């Protein structure tokens, strides 16, 4: 039979027509057994919002309930808006819900091997275990002096240039993670390494917005040669630059160790230094390119997230001024004016601790729960069928602002997180339901993929906000829109001005004195230029 006759034969045509029908019937069957959501179009899925999808997702949760399905092309995504359900799936059934969806653009085309986007499995587990070595309680204790010194330097920089507060926050969080990762501090956000890293991060974040790239719906598009696909060429160039930069940072630490040995100098302890030793001792087979991702992920995942949360705290201060009054009163009693707060004060500053939790709840920086989870086995939940490979998106915006758990959720009030015996506790802020997580919020994610840097971030938040609250009055200069946030993977308030002034002459003298000691301490960690 010739090719032409096969082409025109009736069964070829029947096959061509039957195939999409079979696929469609299969999709309808899958759809009919999954939690109901907005009606998708065959093969195309749902029309997804281009901007701030978490708002639309929250709206849909009011119509379709706390668990519903949306379709990205033919791929189902379950959206969760209730913390209990999120825990049921991603924690109690973490053996089935700890993978990541296929990221055609951010994972396969960018391909920088970030822990964040790796599917559950051996490759992910090696990197994650290495990361955990840097986050043990003992390791976290050794970072505290750096965080204290850096937060004193932060308060002093804000004192010197109050209008530059947001940049100072970025410098602070960058310096904390870089000094931990590579043993080098950051004195300016204009340091090349910070500019480069911020660009990589913002770029990566822009790849993960649902609906941003057609290749996510139609993976075949990833095979288009980059010579005729400028969007792909751009992604590949970013990937090369990021990998080279991560490798150079590890090489820098190797060089520090070499020079230290030659000259008999003490090298500032760092995560990279420790992990290089572990890799050699335990003969962990991880090529340099993949190894370099581990320390690099500290900045990628930990700097902007922490700084953005601090920016949200500033927005909360200027829009809910009474909070600062209460925090100031607590500082005055516990710390006084002769010294600034330290980690030793933590247990005596419950309002400050509650304030940090409330910021994380009120404006979760990883607004869609960070990187989505994916199921790796078929499952049945509340009678619904959830097939293997389903994307699971914990909408932190909807979860953290869920009225059943947090009455009057848009109202910023740290008292929600105070102990019931605390006289400042307000019972009317207790929800009809109790949040199932020990932390009382879901801003660090869930289960086996929960943020490994949560405690480090909480420590940075606590000490930085404590020093800022201790030092300053932070006052509104106009009306603010508490929803005026950036778009993307992580969110932060759009830049805004406010009045920041030192609380008294005594505070000024103490801060100046402690800043000298803090600068001296941070000399242990030479600055990245
Ligand atoms: C306020 C600060 C931070 C917030 C709100 C935050 C939030 C999150 C969230 C929501 C996830 C996704 C969790 C999940 O999939 O269930 C995540 C993952 C991650 N975070 Fe954080 N994070 C913060 C700071 C940090 C810091 C300081 C580090 C540094 C070690 C870090 C490292 C990571 C890494 C490596 C992952 C990927 C984990 C994995 O996929 O296995 N984060 N974070």
Image (tube, rainbow, N blue to C red):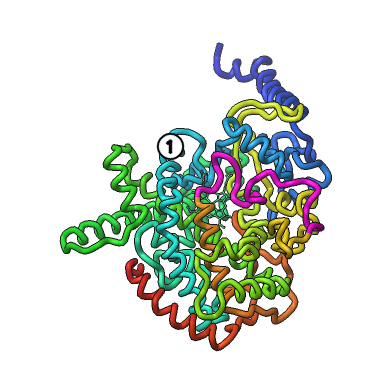
Using the image as rendered, state which of residue 485 and residue 275 is in the foreground. 275
Using the image as rendered, state which of residue 383 and residue 332 is in the foreground. 332
Q: Position of residue 516 (x, y in %)?
A: 40, 79
Residue 444 among magenta residues: yes
Note whether residue 262 is visible: yes
Q: Main secondary structure of the magenta part?
A: loop
Residue 245 placement: quadrant: bottom left
Q: Give me the residue at 58% from left, 19% from top.
A: 4
- Quadrant holding the N terminus: top right
Note whether residue 224 is visible: no
Q: Give me the residue at 52% from left, 44% from top.
A: 117
386 horizontally vs 310: left or right:
right
Circle 1 sits in a helix, a strand or a loop, which is it? helix
380 horizontally vs 154: left or right:
right
- Mark 1, residue position: 123
- Quadrant holding the C terminus: bottom left
Q: Give me the residue at 61% from left, 20% from top.
A: 7
Q: Give me the residue at 70% from left, 26% from top.
A: 380
Give the extent of the magenta segment. Answer: 427-452
513 horizontally vs 476: left or right:
left
Q: Position of residue 500 (x, y in %)?
A: 61, 81
Q: Residue furthest left?
A: 262
């Amino acid at each position: 039979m010739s090719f032409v006759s096969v082409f025109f034969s009736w069964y070829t045509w029947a096959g061509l027509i039957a195939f999409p029908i079979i696929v469609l019937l299969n999709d309808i069957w899958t759809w009919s057994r999954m939690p109901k959501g907005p009606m998708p179009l065959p093969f195309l899925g749902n029309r997804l919002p281009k901007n701030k999808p978490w708002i639309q997702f929250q709206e849909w949760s009011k119509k379709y309930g706390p668990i519903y399905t949306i379709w990205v092309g033919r791929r189902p995504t379950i959206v969760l808006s209730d913390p209990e359900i999120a825990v049921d799936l991603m924690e109690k059934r973490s053996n089935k819900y700890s993978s990541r969806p296929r990221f055609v653009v951010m994972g396969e085309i960018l391909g920088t091997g970030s822990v964040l986007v790796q599917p559950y499995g051996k490759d992910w587990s090696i990197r994650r275990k290495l990361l955990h070595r840097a986050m043990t309680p003992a390791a976290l204790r050794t970072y505290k002096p750096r965080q204290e010194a850096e937060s004193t330097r932060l308060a002093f920089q804000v004192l010197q240039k109050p209008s530059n507060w947001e940049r100072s926050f970025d410098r602070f969080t960058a310096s904390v993670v870089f000094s931990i990762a590579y043993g080098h501090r950051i004195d300016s956000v204009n340091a090349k390494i910070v500019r480069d890293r911020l660009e990589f991060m913002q770029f990566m974040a822009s790849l993960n917005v649902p609906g941003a790239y057609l290749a996510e719906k139609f993976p075949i598009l990833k095979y288009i040669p980059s010579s005729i696909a400028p969007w792909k060429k751009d992604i590949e160039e970013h990937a090369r630059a990021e990998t080279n930069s991560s490798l150079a940072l590890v090489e820098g630490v190797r060089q520090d160790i070499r020079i230290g040995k030659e000259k008999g100098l003490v090298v500032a302890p760092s995560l990279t230094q420790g992990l290089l030793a572990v890799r050699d001792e335990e003969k962990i087979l991880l090529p340099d390119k993949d190894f370099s991702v581990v320390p690099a992920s500290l900045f990628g995942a930990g700097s902007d997230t922490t700084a953005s949360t601090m920016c949200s705290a500033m927005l909360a201060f200027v829009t809910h001024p009474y909070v600062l009054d209460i925090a100031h009163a607590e500082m005055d009693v516990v710390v006084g004016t002769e010294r600034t707060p330290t980690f030793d004060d933590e247990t005596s500053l419950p309002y400050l601790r509650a304030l940090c939790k409330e910021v994380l709840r009120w404006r979760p920086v990883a607004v869609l729960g960070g990187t989505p989870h994916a199921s790796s086995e078929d499952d049945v939940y509340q009678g619904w069928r959830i097939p293997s490979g389903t994307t699971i998106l914990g909408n932190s915006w909807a979860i953290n602002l869920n009225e059943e758990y947090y009455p009057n959720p848009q109202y910023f009030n740290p008292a929600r997180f105070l102990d019931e015996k605390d006289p400042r506790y307000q019972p009317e802020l207790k929800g009809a339901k109790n949040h199932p997580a020990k932390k009382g919020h879901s801003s660090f994610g869930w289960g086996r993929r929960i943020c490994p840097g949560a405690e480090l971030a909480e420590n940075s938040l606590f000490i930085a906000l404590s020093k800022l609250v201790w030092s300053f009055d932070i006052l509104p200069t106009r009306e603010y829109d508490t929803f005026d946030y950036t778009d993307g993977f992580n969110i932060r308030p759009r830049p805004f001005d406010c009045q920041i002034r030192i609380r008294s002459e005594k505070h000024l003298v103490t801060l100046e004195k402690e800043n000298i000691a803090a600068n001296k301490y941070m000399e242990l960690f030479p600055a990245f230029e």
